[in-house]
Image (cartoon, grey):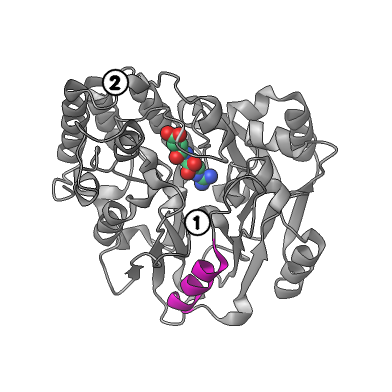
Amino acid sequence: MPVTEINFDGIIGPSHNYAGLSPGNMASANNAGASSHPRAAALQGIEKMRSNLRLGLAQGFFMPLDRPNQKWLAELATDMISAEPHIRAAAFSASAMWAANAATVSPAADTKDGRCHLSVANLITMAHRSHEWRGTVAQLKLAFADEAYFAVHDAVPPPYGDEGAANHMRLCTGHDASGLEIFVYGKSGGPFPARQHIESSKAIARAHQLSPDRVLFVQQAEEAIAAGAFHNDVVAVANEHVLFTHELAFEKPEETYAAIRDAMPEAEIVVVPANRASLADAIQSYLFNAQLVTLPGGAGMALTLPMEAKENDAVWGWLSEMVAGNGPIRKLVPVNVRESMANGGGPACLRLRVVCDPATVDPRFIADEAKLDKIAEVIAAHWPEEIAVDQIGDAALITQVQTARTALLDICALGELV
Ligand code: SUG
């Protein structure tokens, strides 16, 4: 099969909960203390994958990580019984579901050695995410084990924060053509942390052997981070030659657009003006946290976006005008990922894009309807129906969460991912 884009979704783990662990992420803060519904959450994620399969797209998935992370707790000289509540919640988090933060990916067409490079993200800014990367890299090394086609890199060392593909965009004339890779970093976010450091982005560009004239480093607007865009993919998304962005996404938008057009004259930049959808609208509705995908058969591009975008009149009004016009985005596909959204994770957060030949990937990570049926059965049978935050640490819940993940690994023949 030729090179194509595969979306790998993080299967939403059985410990999914709302502990309010991410300052600067409005949804996480607003829903802190609410009860979560892990079973419904994971099934929503499966339905999103099915929706993409129905569009004719290639789909993969990643397993949830082992939670609570007892190794991390042991490194902190504690355990689930004696740890303070915030450490306990950090160890129990299902945050690896947001696969856009798993790694930064440079397809083979962009790299000097002609392999697809993946750098796992260190996620050091948030305690609950800082211990994801070892589990994630183990999984990437399995899924993309064939070193003739892939190079999987460890995380950039501290103190430089890296949040993976959520702050990385690629523009190209076709997925298999060489691309312009845009690394978006933050300097400051007002009251909130800027999670992506430019030094991580530069290190990744070097590790991936990208040609310096095919790379841009662009600063995310401080105003956007301060408004709740803790990752660039909350305010901008790219696919092939199209950049779909909010007017206030970048610190210097005009310079950014000019640099893009200079490096790639075919680029088409679709800007949503702030007077049609404010930053607050963008962050509440997550219209940019959409999967901007190329439909097969020359049908143009589609946006797989959250239902919340449809429910916001200003946002939906603008989007409806856009698809009715002559632009490259022809179709809107709203999906229900409300459980993830309530923690600040939209459709695009839940997936990692990897451009490669699907035949070179370990087939255990590739989805089809029959496999999703089996996974959905395991979720329905084992995932907790509800988790109240004060249950985190409960011995029976911990056992249920561990048993649930083991059942999923078994059905997917991925038992070696302990
Ligand atoms: O890192 N939420 C995640 C959401 C990540 C979204 N990803 C992208 N934009 N690509 C985060 O803030 C919430 C955890 C909690 O509050 O329990 C959380 O980690």
Q: Quadrant of residue 27?
A: top right
Q: Please state the horizontal and vertical placement of residue 174, each as a whole percent of the image.
A: 58, 63
Q: Please state the horizontal and vertical placement of residue 399, each as a whole percent of the image.
A: 16, 27
Q: Please state the horizontal and vertical placement of residue 232, each as a whole percent of the image.
A: 61, 51
- The amino acid marked with disc number 2 is Gln
* Disc 2 C-beta below 8 A from ligand 1: no
Apparent side of residue 168 relative to residue 418 in the rendered image (left or right): right
Apparent side of residue 175 relative to residue 146 in the rendered image (left or right): right
* Disc 1 C-beta below 8 A from ligand 1: yes
Q: Residue at x 38, y 28 (%)?
A: 17
Near-viewer residue (274 or 260): 274
Q: Nearer the viewer, mark 1 or mark 2?
A: 2
Task: Provide the residue span drawn in magenta.
Answer: 197-209
Q: Is residue 104 visible?
A: yes
Image quarter in which the N terminus is found: bottom left
Q: Going by the picture, which residue comes out furthest to the right?
A: 275
* Residue topped by disc 2: 391
Q: Residue at x 29, y 26 (%)?
A: 392
Q: Please state the horizontal and vertical placement of residue 249, each as a whole percent of the image.
A: 71, 51
Residue 277 numbered tag? none
- The amino acid marked with disc number 1 is Ala
Q: Is residue 395 magenta?
A: no
Q: Residue at x 56, y 73 (%)?
A: 178
Q: Is residue 349 visible?
A: no
Q: Residue at x 23, y 27 (%)?
A: 378
Mark 1 nearby-residue class (10 Å; few <14, some 14–19, many ≥20)? many
* Residue topped by disc 1: 165
